[in-house]
């Protein structure tokens, strides 16, 4: 049977995470980061499963139309970090337009008592700062600093670089599985 081809993904609509308190989260994302609260969904039942679980689902819009969203389940509990993953791995990176914007946001966050790590250079590709929101979600603000032709070169080399990593990983771990 003929399968239809993959359809283009237009972009991120939203990334969702559990929050401890919707109002505290609203303050952080709207008042500190400048992302407007654009929608609130309040339900007693989960639409996809029918399960009874009262919640509020809040959405903050970014300039490109995508959103970051949160679920407050009403029990003052934030999502738990993964016990098998270092704290620096799981995060969401949000793009800013310029290095000046990145530095201004670093200063703004620090002025509001948020501990910020960086500016960190990533191979001359992007520069980033890192911090945690009130729910323990690690955030990155980043700006692409590489010239377009450099980024094109990264894209040309990406599959070969990934194959090299996979070969190294298979050689280091019998059966190709990480420890």
Image (tube, grey):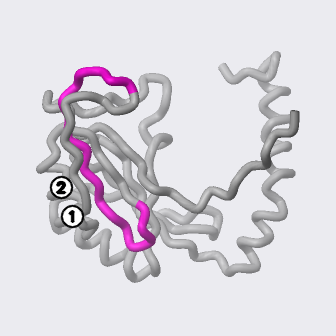
Q: Residue at x 86, y 39 (%)?
A: 2
How many marks can you see? 2
User: What secondary structure is marked by label 2?
Assistant: helix
Q: Are marks 1 and 2 in contact (CB under 8 Å)?
A: yes
Q: Residue at x 46, y 64 (%)?
A: 128
How would you rate the neighbour count of disc 2 (Cα within 10 Å): few for under 14, some for 14-19, many for 20 or more? some
Magenta stretch in the rendered image: 49-66
Residue 135 as seen in the image, left or right of residue 124: left
Q: Residue at x 69, y 23 (%)?
A: 178
Residue 65 as seen in the image, left or right of residue 10: left
Identify residue for label 1: 30
Q: Relative to 161, is 72 above or below?
A: above
Q: Compute the Cα span from label 1 to label 2.
A: 6 Å
Q: Residue at x 19, y 42 (%)?
A: 42
Identify residue for label 2: 26
Residue 56 drawn in magenta? yes
């Amino acid at each position: 049977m003929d399968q239809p081809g993959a359809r283009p993904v237009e972009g991120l609509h939203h990334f969702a995470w559990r929050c401890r308190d919707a109002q505290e989260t609203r303050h952080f994302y709207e008042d500190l980061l400048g992302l407007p609260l654009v929608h609130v969904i309040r339900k007693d039942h989960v639409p996809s499963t029918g399960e009874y679980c009262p919640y509020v689902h809040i959405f903050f819009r970014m300039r490109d139309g995508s959103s970051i969203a949160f679920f407050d389940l009403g029990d003052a509990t934030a999502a738990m970090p993964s016990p098998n993953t270092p704290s620096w791995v799981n995060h969401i990176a949000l793009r800013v337009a310029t290095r000046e914007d990145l530095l201004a946001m670093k200063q703004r966050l620090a002025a509001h008592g948020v501990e910020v790590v960086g500016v960190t250079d990533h191979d001359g590709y992007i520069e980033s700062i890192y911090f945690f929101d009130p729910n323990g979600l690690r955030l990155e603000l980043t700006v692409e600093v590489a010239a377009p032709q450099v980024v094109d070169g990264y894209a040309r080399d990406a599959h070969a670089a990934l194959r090299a990593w996979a070969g190294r990983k298979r050689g280091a771990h019998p059966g190709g599985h990480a420890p």
